[in-house]
Image: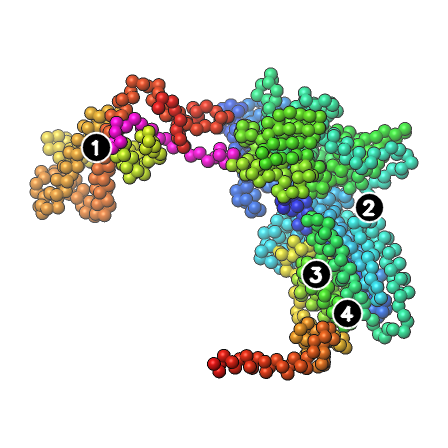
Amino acid sequence: MTPVSSKLYTDDVSLLMVLIDTNPYFWSSMKNTAFTFSKFLSHVLAFLNSLLLLNQMNQVVVIATGYNSCDYVFDSSSSSMQRAECLLEKLEEFVDKDESLSQEDSVDGVGFSLLSGSLSMALCYIQRVFRTGPLHPQPRILCLHGSPDGPGQYVAVMNAIFSAQRSMVPIDSCVIGSQHSAFLQQASYITGGVYLKPQVSDGLFQYLSTVFATDLHSRAFLQLPRPVGVDFRASCFCHKNTIDMGYICSVCLSIFCKHHKKCSTCGSNFGEARKQDPSASDQRRKTPDGS
Amino acid sequence: MIPQQWTPPCNKQCTNKFSALTQIPWRVFCKKACDADGDTWEECLEECEEMCYKGPVLKDQQWSAYIDRAPGSATQSEDCHRACVAGCGFKFDIPSEKRLGTMPQVKIVARNFMDMVASLPAVKLDMLYDNSFICEAILRSLPPLAKKYVLQLLYIDIPISAKSMEESVLPDGFSKHKVAIDRLIQLRVMTETFDRKKEAMYQLSPKFQFNLQKHIVHGGVLPREPMPSNITVRLPSLEELEAYAVEQWECFLLHLISSSEAGKTTNISSSMMKVFQRGLLSQRDDREPPRLTESGFQFLLMDTNAQLWYIIREYITNAEERGVDSADLIAFLLELSFHVTGKAYNTNTLTDIQRSITKDLSDLGLVKLQQGRKESWFIPTKLATNLSISLADTTSRKQGFIVIETNFRLYAYSTSKLHCEILRLFARVEYQLPNLIVGAITKESLYKAFQNGITAEQIISFLQQNAHPRVAERIPSVPENVTDQIRLWESDLNRVEMMPAHLYDEFPSRDVFEAACDFAREYGGLLWEDSKQMRIIVKADILTEMKEFLRFLGTAMLFYGIWMVRVWQRDAADSHSSPDYDHFPWIIHAFLGIGTALCAITCLGHVAAISANSFCLSSYMFIIFVLLLSEVAMAADVMLNNDWEKDLPEDPSGRFDDFVEFVISNKDVFRWIALFSVLAQGCSMLFATMLRIIGKVKKYSHENEGEYAEPWAPLLRPPELPPATMYPPYVIGEPVYKGV
């Protein structure tokens, strides 16, 4: 019955999960660059409209990534008209809720937004779409992210990335902030998505429509921006620092910046194993030679 | 200028009226018909069909469309035909009513609406883009890459060079890129200009750009406000609406294929119906009911959306005749598809033309018209809202009804007469219950279908698409043995290879039979043997092949002889005043003589082979034998005797020396020719021997002519095929005939 299913959905029908960064600390730090949250939103809204214009079967879901929480803000399959109003209303509610959750004293400088949470939510949504049957639009995730990476979320983000890789969902990332994001670089690299940091943030819509509106079918024919270099550095599990060199648990591959006697993740005992192993292997090697 | 508006001009008129060949390709075809060679109207039409209905030269290659006889999109083919018919009509003074009736046999291609839009003339197309819904619908119909380009160029006001667009395309995608760009230019969404360096620059059509920009900023809006629910009482629910649409559509289809069968009458005028029917039905004469054509069958097996497209296309192409501008009609249909299914819209918001269109559409089931106390309104059904969705999308797929068992029984849970009619096309309907049709797929019913031009794949896909939900869950939904058997039966029709052959039987003894078999096998001519009953079937052409070669040799020699006579006469005329017939050169005699003799021998061989007369064959064998002996003797003489040339009489014409020189210079070729001629003669002798043996056999059965004629009839023939006169006799498998 495959011919029927391929007939039902044309190649370019896509489900786009858009993760927008609503971290208030990040946007307040952007105030002096003239690229404000409202401008950003107008670009994103135009982009969403254009995606829905391309194909009536296209579906767009927007997830807001806040400082303390994340939530579905908009789903094109449920609301038909007045998209912008619907989205803005929900977004406002979300920001209020997110603010009420935060404690005043916790933040110094620009905080980290909850990328791991919104990535997981997007993947959950995609899994639900997968389970509706063999016929579904082609999903992809687009992260519009500005806040710096939260090293504390390293494990959760990496797990989400690998989960996306397993279910063949590319993660596109568009970094709005001033710094590159190592998490998103890795996410796009591993899942085969596009990583882009726009040079001119005022032309965000043009970047979005040129690069990120490309459906998965057309990507096979087009040259999309390739990353110059990917920051593959990992965070250690013990202090959440980003490190170049460290110790790795041979059992569970956990990363540590210092030598530990016992792995905090799987509980393996390092000290003894190191003493026993070489002698055991030496002995094993010697026996065939001796005989 | 579109073909419908265009009256049939001819010759000079054709040429004068239209300047650019590229814009009006059908002008040429009118002229071609005016100048056609055929002496009758029918012959002229035949030429039209040959000329216009030709696929692209290279499939899937855009540029090949320009080499194609009827260039451009597929509608051009029809335009070409119309123009050509117009030209023919002009030539033979045929009234225009008759001309319109001659729609050619075109294979129905369920084509996209957008192809029709693309074939509109430039001015109308530009006018269409004033409407933002049309812009939206057209954008959605584009190939994915083209959509992306439009989006990319949406906020760019200056022309973009083609090179910069090509830069981002990978080598694999270049053909797709070309298709996308061609489509955009064809639809005039993008215009191509050339800058000073003759490089192509692309720019979006400003109207199109503006409308889409508006859409992107403000989001989608509805074409017209639905009426408030307090006015529109008793609105049908979505299910009722869908049932209504299906019912209307089936009623229309039933009406289309057989006007008598349909219980309910539709309001569609009979002239409209005729328009829809042409190409689907054909009527040999007025007395017998119209018969479905091959394309008609294909039409019935298509899914609803594809059928709808076909009808809508016909509806649009005939809009001009009804005084409706086709651009208006397309605009309205596209706009209709943006309405919300199941919502009521006031008919007062429509223009007069649109109101009359909605009446027609309600007969097709696209909209439902309702009359309130004061106002009337229309409710678009799913059929209408799916119009702008590309053809491939079949969200309107209805529930299946067919269950097929592995024993080829077919159960169709349906009350519709149409379904019964469709099933009858390829299955034997056994009985009909109120909600169930029971039938069987048999070899005979399928042969009937294949004969009508339905292919096995079409039947299988129809069965799969309409599988009952209970069996649709299973994979495969149609049992594999049934699908395989349907395919096998189809390939049965194409499998038989025909080959003229002779059947020999009643051999006098087993030795003779075996000798004949061995001989035939040696020469690769044995097709079939039955050692029990001593019958063999041999290819008819072995003997003739061998004889052909000899005849060729003889004729060549004869011609050479004649040519030499001519040359000798000329030489003689130069040297003496009159040719000296006393010293006629012997070489010419020899060549003429041998040539004639060879021809005569071949002729004798031919006669002997056909009559299979043993005396004839014997004498043929004898002559060939003598020929062989003399050849051997001559060869021996030439080889062993060093001055063999002295044995021959003097040649006054000098032709002999020329000949020898020629032979020596082409030694290799002549060696082969000699070898072949000797071989051919040897083979002829062997064949003659064999025929002599068989000839004896033939004599026995000569008294019984009627029985003997039997093996010539085709031994295996599908029951429904036309009589044997059309086929050369052929044999396959176990021959069956009486009297043995």
Contact between marks 3 and 4 (CB within 8 A): the answer is no
Chain letter belonging to callout 2: B
Looking at the rendered image, the disc whose residue lies closer to the viewer, 4 or 2, is 4
For the residues labelled 3 and 2, the Cα–Cα distance comes to 36 Å
Earlier in the chain: of badge 2 and badge 1, it is: 2
Q: Contact, CB < 8 Å: mark 3 with mark 1?
A: no
Can residue B185 be seen here? no
Q: Disc 4 designates what residue?
A: A153
Considering the image in quadrants, where does the N terminus of chain A appear? top right
Residue for badge 3? A164
Residue B39 highlighted magenta (yes or no):
no
Q: CA distance from mark 3 to mark 4?
A: 16 Å
Question: Do the numbered discs 3 and 2 sit on residues whose CB atoms are within 8 Å?
Answer: no
Identity, as a three-letter code, of the amino acid under mark 3: Ala
Where is residue B249 drawn, in percent x and y? 72, 31
Q: Which residue is denoted by mark 2 in the rendering?
A: B221
Label 1 SS: helix
Image position, residue B497 (x, y; %): 42, 34
Give the structural element (helix, strand or loop) at label 3.
helix
Residue at 51 percent of width and 36 percent of height: B488
Viewer-proximal residue among A202 and B344: B344
Task: Please tell me whether mark 2 sits on a helix, a strand or a loop.
Answer: loop
Q: Amino acid at mark 1?
A: Leu
For mark 3, name the chain.
A
Which residues are drawn in magenta?
A: B489-512
* Pick the front one: B219 or B34: B219
In the current view of this chain or complex, which residue is farthest to the top?
B287
Figure check: B57 above or below A286: above
Q: Residue furthest front?
A: A291
**Mark 4 falls on what kind of element?**
helix
